[in-house]
Image (cartoon, rainbow, N blue to C red):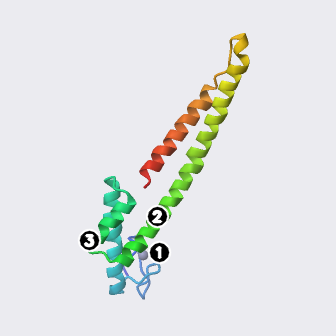
Amino acid sequence: MDIIDCPHCEGRVIPNASGICPSCQKNVNDLALVAQSRKLLSLRAEINQRRLAGMSLKSALKAMTAEQFDHAMIQQVGAEYERDLAMYSFEVKKFYLVPGIAALVIGLTVTIGSMLYLQRIGTGIIWHGMVVYGLLSTLTGLVKLYHAR
Ligand SMILES: [Zn+2]
């Protein structure tokens, strides 16, 4: 058999003698299954297009019910997207918000604490680096979370 674009997973593959894609294990000759996969691919493309245009996942999914896609398919794809979104939000919180807020708290505590304590001799430590890092990391995290919806 020749190299083809798998209609299910879109990979460049050489199916085996019975038409099974080595990548996704689906039959490239099963016409009903191919039709189903094409619908799923175009549903994902429609959703991606709307989300790139700034629409939230919820609104994009709602817009799909007005198109030719059936309810079960929208629910299936919606669940996949929601899983990805939840995972992404978790990563953003873990790598930006938590360290950012921690740095802010520590940086500001040291800065304000040392200024109050050392006020009487007219000096204090301003922990610039920590505060700036904390602020940037927190803001980056918030912007990322805002866009992940
Ligand atoms: Zn495949």
Residue matched to label 3: 67
Report the amino acid beneath label 1. Ser
The percent position of residue 28, horizontal first and vertical second, equals 37, 82
Q: Residue furthest bottom?
A: 18
Of the image marks 1 and 3, the number of the one nearer the N terminus:
1
Of the image marks 3 and 2, the number of the one nearer the N terminus:
3
Residue at point 42% right, 74% down?
A: 76
The percent position of residue 6, horizontal first and vertical second, equals 38, 75
Does the beta carbon at disc 1 come under 8 Å from ligand 1? yes
User: Could you tell me if the residues under marks 2 and 1 are in contact, i.e. CB atoms within 8 Å?
Assistant: no
Dot 1 crowding, Cα within 10 Å, few <14, some 14–19, many 20+: some
Front residue of 33/77: it is 77
- Which numbered mark, 1 or 3, is in the foreground of this view? 3
Q: Residue furthest top?
A: 121
> What secondary structure is marked by label 3?
loop
- Which numbered mark, 2 or 1, is in the foreground of this view? 2
* In-image side of 77 versus 112 (left or right): left
User: Could you tell me if the residues under marks 3 and 2 are in contact, i.e. CB atoms within 8 Å?
Assistant: no
Front residue of 14/95: it is 95
Residue 121's disc is: none
Report the amino acid beneath label 3. Glu
> What secondary structure is marked by label 1?
loop
Residue at point 51% right, 56% down?
A: 88
Using the rendered image of the protein, determine whether residue 6 is visible from the camera's viewpoint.
no
Residue 23's disc is: 1
Report the amino acid beneath label 2. Glu
The percent position of residue 132, horizontal first and vertical second, equals 56, 31
Residue at point 61% right, 45% down?
A: 98
Ligand 1 quadrant in view: bottom left
Residue matched to label 2: 82
* In-image side of 83 versus 116 (left or right): left
